[in-house]
Amino acid sequence: MIKSLFSKQPPVMVGIDIGSHSVKAVLLSQHNGLFKVEAFAIEAMQKGAMSDREVQDIEAVGNVLAKIRKKIPRSVKYAAIAISGSTVISKVIFMDVSLTDAELESQIEVEADTLIPYPLNEVSLDFEKLDVNEADPSKVNVLLSAARTESVEARVAALAHGGFTAKVVDVESYALSRATELCLAQLPADAGSKVVAMVDIGATMTLLSIVEDGKTLYTRDQVFGGEQYTRSILSYYNKSYDEAEHAKVNGELPPNYTFEVLAPFQTMLLQQIRRGIQMYLTSSGREAVDYLVVSGGSALIEGIDKLLIDELGIHTVIADPFASMEIATAVDRETLDRYAPQLMVASGLALRSFSPWHI
């Protein structure tokens, strides 16, 4: 029996993004088709508790989640979380169009050795029928996502330690894709039917999701993030890691830091985004990406949107998933606005409570 990564009809859940440097949580409600922010929280991750997007210390991660638990209404027990990195595999396979879901499951089990580079008893996986293959109408495109079960179970255990029950385990790049709908109001009116590149720059990982008309066309995880900026500050100005991180976040750097550390980091960031988009264009045969939405901690670097517009020639905005939402009175709007770009993945996970997406 295939172990399912995904839940089909989840209840209202808090979206929790467990990152290398922090845990972010977003709780949304929906009324008459409109979303409302009911609560959010950000807590720093204990150093060493996560490494390469993998849980190294379940208890330490659970303790951080317990702090999040205190900021989320007690009535909300369930959480949607996500995985990313080298242990996650997502690919589109082609199966006979006439197969039912049960028959697809059986066929995937039979062919697992050729589809997944891990023994079937070591992975959790799920699949989703997409659409009929244009080149061969007798085939249907099927999205297959798999992850090492130990990676899934470590996150589930950490959640339990923190007082939550895991209801959905998603893939980070698909959670980012799902959050696209929350940012369409920031883009021109035709964005819903155009090719939109979502780029989330975390501490150690940059996610790229290409979306068109609500469909995910391409995803890519790149080992690159804001930690490299922090380490440049650390080495250049002889600071400790914590001092460098504090100086970066609070802007407490010498006037010449722009040329000494910021410009080189911006160049590396630009190269990563350009390479990711070029790989998509090459593999898809498309000529261009229409819009770019940037999120994550490094999206807060002043002028990053202008840099990308100037260098890539793509209409770029900094993500604000809450721009069109009502905000609960208990939520600090100023703090939410400040951290909004970092809450994209958590927001995409929170949408699992209302969206018909199977993934």
Image (spheres, rainbow, N blue to C red):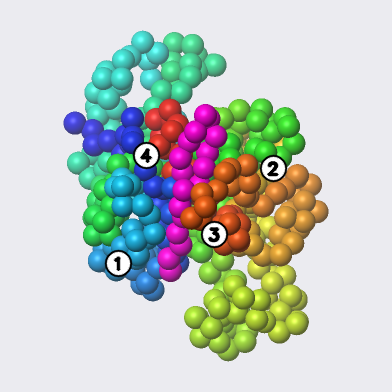
Query: Residue 34's spot in the image, x, y percent?
Result: 55, 34
The disc, 4 or 1, on the residue closer to the chain's N-terminal end is 4
- Callouts 2 and 4 close, C-beta under 8 Å: no
Query: Residue 151's spot in the image, x, y percent?
Result: 29, 52
Q: How far apart, in angstroms, are the residues tagged by discs 2 and 1?
A: 36 Å
Which label lies toward us, 3 or 1? 3
Q: How far apart, in angstroms, are the residues tagged by discs 2 and 4?
A: 26 Å
Within 10 angstroms of label 4, few (less than 14), some, or many (20 or more) residues?
Answer: many
Prevailing SS of the magenta stretch: strand
Which label lies toward us, 2 or 4? 4
Task: Tell me if residue 158 comes above or below residue 290 in the rendering.
Answer: below
In this view, the residue in front, 136 or 246, is: 246
The disc, 2 or 1, on the residue closer to the chain's N-terminal end is 1
Q: Which residue is mark 1?
A: 63
- Callouts 3 and 1 close, C-beta under 8 Å: no
Q: How far apart, in angstroms, are the residues tagged by discs 3 and 2?
A: 22 Å
In the picture, the disc for residue 186 is 2
Q: Which residue is mark 4?
A: 12
Q: Which residue is mark 3?
A: 332
Picture quadrant of residue 341: bottom right
Under circle 3, the secondary element is loop
Which label lies toward us, 3 or 4? 3
Query: Residue 140's spot in the image, x, y percent?
Result: 44, 18
Amino acid type for the residue under numbered disc 1: Asn
Q: How far apart, in angstroms, are the residues tagged by discs 4 and 1?
A: 23 Å
Camera sees residue 301:
yes
Under circle 1, the secondary element is helix
